[in-house]
Image (cartoon, rainbow, N blue to C red):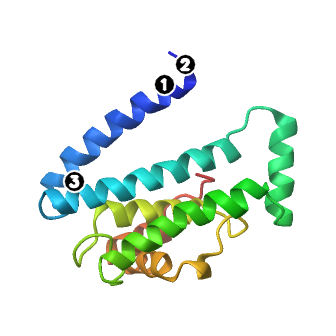
């Protein structure tokens, strides 16, 4: 199995587990339409995760050094900065607007979609995403971060790169 097929297989399995666990616990929306909206958001977030993986998990040390220089100087690859980031985060902004700009992707409460966005926010350097360009995305992130359980975990968790 090649690397791409391996990642796809893991993603399908992960999605199936997410769907089952979070549907039962109420974090996958109410009903099929909200679950579909959650799936849509998770698909976009998965694209962002793959982009981050490609940036930060590079095995070639010369290419990794180049990425590091781009990030620290704010001079990352034009395709990422000017195409991929606006595409993905523009989609997320649009999906949040479609839900009434209330800071949640589905309904009026936190779902796994919101948690997943918070998770990538926490791992994405400002050099990659200018959060002020995506006010609804930032509002969603702030909503999740204000959750007492999430806030307590963020304060005590171990510091890691990812």
Residue 27 as seen in the image, left or right of residue 128:
left
Q: Tell me the residue that label 3 is attached to.
A: 22
**Can I make out residue 119 in this image?**
yes
Q: Going 79% across and 54% down the picture, which residue do you hit?
A: 77
Q: Does residue 47 lie above or below 17 as drawn?
A: below
Place of residue 16 in the rendered image (x, y in percent of width and height, measured from the top left): 26, 39
Q: Tell me the residue that label 1 is attached to.
A: 5
3 or 2: tag closer to the N-terminus: 2
> Dot 3 surroundings within 10 Å: few (below 14), some, or many (20 or more)?
some
- Dot 1 and dot 2 residues touching (CB under 8 Å): yes
Label 3 – label 2 distance at C-alpha: 30 Å
Tell which of 76 and 121 is nearer to you.
Answer: 76
Q: Going 48% across and 24% down the picture, which residue do you hit?
A: 5
1 or 3: tag closer to the N-terminus: 1
> Dot 1 surroundings within 10 Å: few (below 14), some, or many (20 or more)?
few
Q: Going 36% across and 83% down the picture, which residue do you hit?
A: 101
Q: Going 60% across and 66% down the picture, which residue do you hit?
A: 86
Find numbered disc 1 in the image and state the secondary structure of the residue it sits on: helix
Label 1 – label 2 distance at C-alpha: 5 Å
Residue 38 as seen in the image, left or right of residue 73:
left
Q: Does residue 156 lie above or below 43 as drawn?
A: below
Label 1 – label 3 distance at C-alpha: 25 Å
Tell which of 82 and 45 is nearer to you.
Answer: 82
Instruction: Examine the image and state in which quarter residue 129 appears.
Output: bottom right
Q: Tell me the residue that label 2 is attached to.
A: 2
Find numbered disc 3 in the image and state the secondary structure of the residue it sits on: helix
Place of residue 36 in the rendered image (x, y in percent of width and height, measured from the top left): 24, 55
Residue 130 is labelled as none
Place of residue 148 in the rendered image (x, y in percent of width and height, measured from the top left): 33, 78
Residue 103 as seen in the image, left or right of residue 81:
left
The mark tally for this picture is 3
């Amino acid at each position: 199995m090649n690397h791409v097929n391996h990642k796809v297989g893991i993603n399908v399995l992960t999605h199936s587990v997410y769907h089952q666990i979070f549907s039962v616990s109420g974090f996958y929306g109410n009903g099929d339409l909200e679950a579909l909206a959650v799936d849509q958001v998770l698909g976009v977030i998965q694209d962002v995760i793959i982009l981050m993986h490609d940036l930060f998990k590079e095995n070639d040390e010369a290419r990794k050094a180049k990425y590091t220089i781009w990030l620290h100087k704010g001079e990352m690859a034009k395709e990422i900065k000017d195409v991929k980031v606006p595409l993905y985060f523009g989609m997320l902004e649009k999906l949040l607007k479609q839900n009434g700009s209330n800071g949640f992707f589905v309904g009026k409460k936190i779902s796994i979609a919101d948690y997943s966005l918070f998770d990538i926010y926490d791992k994405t350097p400002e050099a990659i995403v200018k959060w002020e360009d995506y006010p609804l995305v930032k509002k969603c992130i702030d909503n999740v971060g204000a959750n007492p359980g999430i806030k307590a975990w963020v304060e005590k968790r171990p510091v890691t790169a990812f």
